[in-house]
Image (cartoon, rainbow, N blue to C red):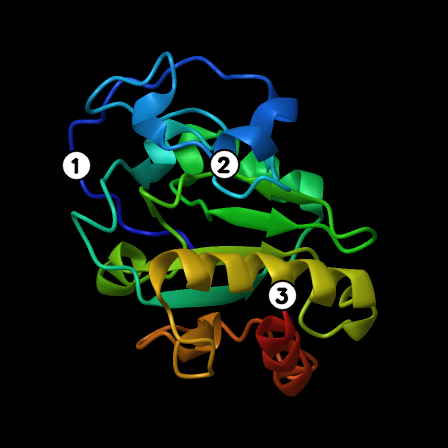
Amino acid sequence: MERATPRPEQRRPRLSRRKILQGTALAAVPYALLPEWRAGLHVPGPDYPLAEWRPASTANYTVANRPLSHPVDRVIIHVTQTRYRNSLSVFQRPKHQVSAHYVVRSADGHTSQCVREADIAWHAGDWDLNTRSVGVEHEGWVDQPAWFTDVMYETSARLTATICARHGIPTDRAHIIGHYEVPGTDHTDPGPHWDWTRYIRLVNAV
């Protein structure tokens, strides 16, 4: 995870949370047709119907209207360097000034969405890449490959394939990158034990 420099911006009011169990049905319905949709407001709940909605503090990301306000052309792969639940807690605390769009749990692939894809999460440590990427965190440590379970790879690959399809992002290594590939970063995640060949194959098999 990376502490990003916040960009001051007036944030739009956010609506109350809908039932998570409606996620799959809502994903197929245009936002403008939803009963409580209003211009300028985000529909609550996850973009990805298989994710649980666990919102980050509004102090830890920038409200936007992507892809209209900023093009989205990258998925950035991260490793949390902490437990899954700790990552969610960090994103929910305003003082940390960091967030990612998604967090994937090691043991079972359970996925939480913390920031809407329309908004700019503070995960890359580079403002330009923050504005045009979706950040996916994975529970674990870069030097402990046992955290990178089969179910984590498979679940994350489905998520990344869905993100790429939604935004028209090519499913290759030029557009699905590691945090260590962000210009100027001192981070090494996802680290030498992350199997990129396997991961890209799984993304393209979805």
Disc 3 residue type (three-letter): Ala
Give the answer, above or below, for where 21 lies relative to 51: above
- The answer to which quarter of the image holds residue 124 is bottom left
Q: Nearest to the eye among marks 2 and 1: give it.
A: 2
Distance, label 2 to label 1, CA atoms, is 30 Å
Q: Quadrant of the C terminus?
A: bottom right
Looking at the image, tell me whether mark 2 or mark 1 is earlier in sequence order: 1
- In this figure, which residue is indicated by the disc labeled 3? 157
Give the answer, above or below, for where 98 lies relative to 25: below
The kind of secondary structure element at disc 2 is helix
Residue 27, disc: 2
- The answer to which quarter of the image holds residue 6 is top left
Q: Nearest to the eye among marks 3 and 1: give it.
A: 3
Give the answer, above or below, for where 20 lies relative to 78: above
| Contact (Cβ within 8 Å) of mark 2 with mark 1 | no
Disc 2 residue type (three-letter): Ala
Q: Position of residue 153 (x, y in %)?
A: 71, 67
- In this figure, which residue is indicated by the disc labeled 1? 8
Q: Position of residue 77 (x, y in %)?
A: 52, 66
State the residue at coordinates (54%, 38%).
Answer: 90
Distance, label 3 to label 1, CA atoms, is 33 Å
Q: Position of residue 152 (x, y in %)?
A: 74, 61
Classify residue 59 as left or right of residue 71: right
